Amino acid sequence: MSVSIPGRVLGIDPGSRVTGYGVIDVAGRGARQTLGYVTSGCIKSGSGEMPARLGVIYRGVKEIVDEFQPEIVAIERVFLAKNPASALKLGQARGVAIAAAVSAELEVAEYAAREVKLAVTGTGGAAKTQVQHMVRVILQLAGTPAEDAADALAIAICHVNTAGLAPALRP
C-alpha cells in the first residue's frame, strides 16, 4: 500500500524556553512523493515568568499558522522527565502550542521522540546530531538547521512518513 499525504505540515518541538518549528510541503503521491522545505526556526520565550513565556509561545505558533497556512500540525509528545517541574513546564508549553493550532481549526498529530528518530534516522536512539544531519539530507538543505528547528522538521517528516500507516496496520 502506498502512503501519501500531500499538503503543508507544521512540526513543533515544544519547550518552555525555546520551541522549535518547521514547515514542509508535501507534493506528489506514492513513490513520487517529495518533501520541500518552507521555513524553520525557534520561538524564544526567554526566562521570565511562566505565564508570559506561554503567551509568547501561543502567539508565536499562531503567527506561524497564520503566515504559512499548514493543513496539519505534528507535535512531540511529552516524555517522562526526571524532574517533575520540568515535565510540567514542558506540558504547559506543549498545551499552548496545541491550543494555538486548534484555535485555527487544525488537526494535531502527536509523536513520541523515539518514533520521530526512528522515522527520520532509522533508529529510535539516534543522537541529536544524527537527526540534524538526516533532516538536512532529506530536505536537501544547504546548511544544518539549529537543534530545535531540526527536531521540529523531523517531527513534520515523521508525520509524512508514518501518518497513513496506522489505518493500514489495523487488523
Image (tube, grey):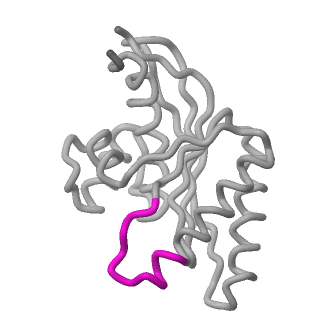
- The quarter of the picture where residue 55 lies is bottom right
Examine the rendered structure and indicate whether residue 80 appears above or below residue 37. Answer: below
- The quarter of the picture where residue 146 lies is bottom left
Q: Nearer the viewer, residue 132 or 107?
A: 107
The spot of residue 93 in percent (x, y) is 61, 69
Q: Nearer the viewer, residue 7 or 140?
A: 7
Taking the spot 60% from the left edge, 48% from the top edge, the residue there is 39
Q: Nearer the viewer, residue 102 or 143?
A: 102
The spot of residue 51 in percent (x, y) is 73, 82
Q: Residue furthest front?
A: 171
Q: Residue furthest bottom?
A: 48
Q: Nearer the viewer, residue 113 or 62?
A: 113
Examine the rendered structure and indicate whether residue 5 appears above or below residue 9. Answer: above
* Quadrant where the C terminus is found in the figure: top left
Residue range highlighted in magenta: 78-88
Taking the spot 67% from the left edge, 84% from the top edge, the residue there is 50
* Total numbered labels: 0
The spot of residue 151 in percent (x, y) is 42, 56
The spot of residue 66 in percent (x, y) is 80, 47
Horizontal side of 156 relative to 143 (left or right) equals right
Examine the rendered structure and indicate whether residue 97 appears above or below residue 103. Answer: below
Taking the spot 57% from the left edge, 60% from the top edge, the residue there is 41
Horizontal side of 20 relative to 116 (left or right) equals right
Horizontal side of 4 relative to 132 (left or right) equals right
Look at the image and say whether residue 75 sits in the magenta stretch.
no
Taking the spot 46% from the left edge, 81% from the top edge, the residue there is 86
Examine the rendered structure and indicate whether residue 170 appears above or below residue 21. Answer: above
* Quadrant where the N terminus is found in the figure: top left
Q: Residue furthest top?
A: 1
